[in-house]
Amino acid sequence: MATEATTTTKFPESDLRPIPQPPDFHPAIIVPAQNTTLKFWQLMVAGSIAGSVEHMAMFPVDTVKTHMQALRSCPIKPIGIRQAFRSIIKTDGPSALYRGIWAMGLGAGPAHAVYFSFYEVSKKFLSGGNPNNSAAHAISGVFATISSDAVFTPMDMVKQRLQIGNGTYKGVWDCIKRVMREEGFGAFYASYRTTVLMNAPFTAVHFTTYEAVKRGLRDMLPEHAGGEEDEEGWLIYATAGAAAGGLAAAVTTPLDVVKTQLQCQGVCGCDRFKSGSISDVFRTIVKKDGYRGLARGWLPRMLFHAPAAAICWSTYETVKSFFQDLNGAA
């Protein structure tokens, strides 16, 4: 009986060697998906830190702006940034640039915690997973500002009165007690309607511009963005934030002037208004200072909000990235 021969194919040894790969080649590794969704309290902490850093860093510029906008004498002489700055230094010394900073610290942290957490939750709900939904960004910004202004307005009023007070109040608590005793609780919210009317368009412009510029920069500078939000470079956050802050500030300056008038009325010779009507304040400003009065402080306002927004957004996104890494490692 014939035995069938079995043939075995032999290859030269050289054919069995591994195929050379480029130096930067790495075999694919399947990594289990990590949970990088931020918790609500983490959004609040990130927002609180960002808001506090932003306002404390730019506080002297805000003081100059407040002095420029306060309506005191009639007729009003034009006053620029240098004049306002020199006047503050000459009258009260350099420390006057930081008068009211503790009121800002007490208000900015909680208010921004509400601001950013409400924005993130609203954006996630309204955008439907579409990162290019500008309407969702704008509406979410409006929701965020209505909520945060309810927290921030009382301390903002105290802050502005201390900024121009020139010794009228001994400090934050003295101002709170005297306002409560002499004017009642309503004085803390005298400018709330104006603040919301100002900050609603401000925030809509701000968030829409920020998201659009950030998206554009990610496309233009891929080396600063690895495709995931937590890997974007601080340069993108800062640039997008500065553009958003500067544009939004310029658009809403007239309402900011009205807000300052309502919050500082009766302090150091500032006009007191019979009603808290926005139209009444508008008419008074135009009567005393013309329409240019509605633009008072626009330059320091832009000089405040552009770098402030850059600081705020880069801080906020950095803290978010920290929490995302923390959640992913858990």
Image (tube, grey):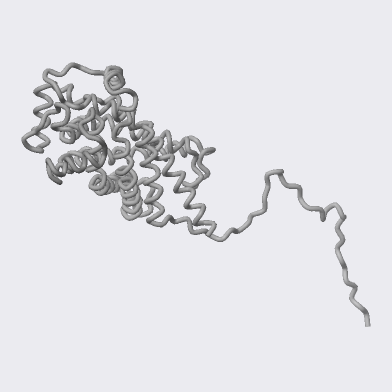
Which residue occupies the foreground of this view, 102 or 134? 102
User: Can residue 110 be seen?
Assistant: yes
Q: How far across and how far down the image is residue 96, in percent?
A: 30, 27
Image position of 300 with respect to 173: above or below: above
Q: How far across and how far down the image is residue 216, in percent?
A: 42, 37
The residue depicted at 88 percent of the width and 71 percent of the height is 6
Quadrant containing the N terminus is bottom right
The residue depicted at 43 percent of the width and 41 percent of the height is 315
Identity of the residue furthest to the right in this view: 1
The residue depicted at 23 percent of the width and 38 percent of the height is 158
Image position of 199 with respect to 293: above or below: below
Image position of 87 with respect to 255: above or below: above
Q: How far across and how far down the image is residue 137, in percent?
A: 32, 46
Q: How far across and how far down the image is residue 68, in percent?
A: 23, 24
Q: Is residue 132 left or right of residue 259?
A: right
The number of callouts visible is 0
Task: Identify the image quadrant of residue 259.
Answer: top left
The residue depicted at 12 percent of the width and 26 percent of the height is 285
User: Can residue 139 be seen?
Assistant: no
Identity of the residue furthest to the bottom in this view: 1
Which residue occupies the foreground of this view, 96 or 47? 96
